[in-house]
Image (cartoon, rainbow, N blue to C red):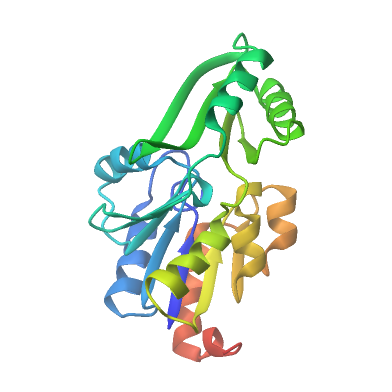
Amino acid sequence: MKVLLTDFDETITRHHEISKKTREFLTEIKKKRIVDLIVISTEKSRESFLKTKEEYQIDFHDYVICSNGAVVMDRHEEVLFFVDIPKKHLLVNSLKRIGSGPIKEQKISMVKNKIVSLNYTMRNEEIAKVFMQLINEKSLGVLATQNSIYVDVNNKKADKWRTYQTLMTSILDIPSYFTISMGDNDNDLPILAGADISYSFYHGTNLARENAIKVVSCVEKALQEILLGEKTGRVNKFI
């Protein structure tokens, strides 16, 4: 069982677009069954991803992990698994004390009337970094991550790799699998470090590049290598 586990923003997309070549490679990978499953793993909330799915006409994935590991959906948008935020009232009150001045926008993602993620748009990257640090210092059972001016807050027990393992072993009952991952940001570190083969990119963060097995120029290069690797047998070398 081979799986392509990939980040979405600035990995599958670049500058808010999915290139024609990226679509062609993903379609070929799917059509030729180079991998058995394609799993998208994104910081986007479930609600945000559903809008994005329609906007970008995404049809190449089998499953999607949203909110940095807090929610799993199948391609038919059914929620298979979620991890809610503990002590949500304590968390919300603490965030109010931090102050809302630097916050441009706050969104709450919910599944079955439970909060699974809080998503903040800050006024600039420096404020976002400080806001993230303040949340993490409070030890409220949550983890805040930053991506540019955005700060996402999830249950500390949820991360992209741990939830991916839950999907494979507990939900799909597949105990053995080979994973190829792609990502560009710090919230992708779990999937970059955990996969059998992992790709990051020249535009990726320092930590993303350090944790990836391969660093290439762009997603098209990574997908091309996956296709060529299958033809030459190189993709199988770690199995």
Residue found at x 56% / y 39%: 86
Which quadrant, please, contains the N terminus?
A: bottom left
Where is residue 23? Give x, y as percent.
33, 58
Q: Is residue 122 left or right of residue 131?
A: left
Does residue 21 appear in this view? Answer: yes
Is 1 situated above or below 87?
Answer: below
Q: Quadrant of residue 183?
A: bottom right
Is 216 situated above or below 10?
Answer: below
Residue found at x 30% / y 80%: 32
Which quadrant, please, contains the C terminus?
A: bottom right
Residue found at x 30% / y 42%: 50
Q: Nearer the viewer, residue 11 or 131?
A: 131
Q: Is residue 168 left or right of residue 99?
A: left
Q: Nearer the viewer, residue 118 or 196?
A: 118
Q: Nearer the viewer, residue 192 or 175?
A: 175
Residue found at x 61% / y 87%: 238
Residue at the far top: name it: 101
Where is residue 171? Give x, y as percent.
39, 69
Where is residue 114? Give x, y as percent.
41, 37
Does residue 185 appear in this view? Answer: no
Q: Quadrant of residue 60?
A: bottom left
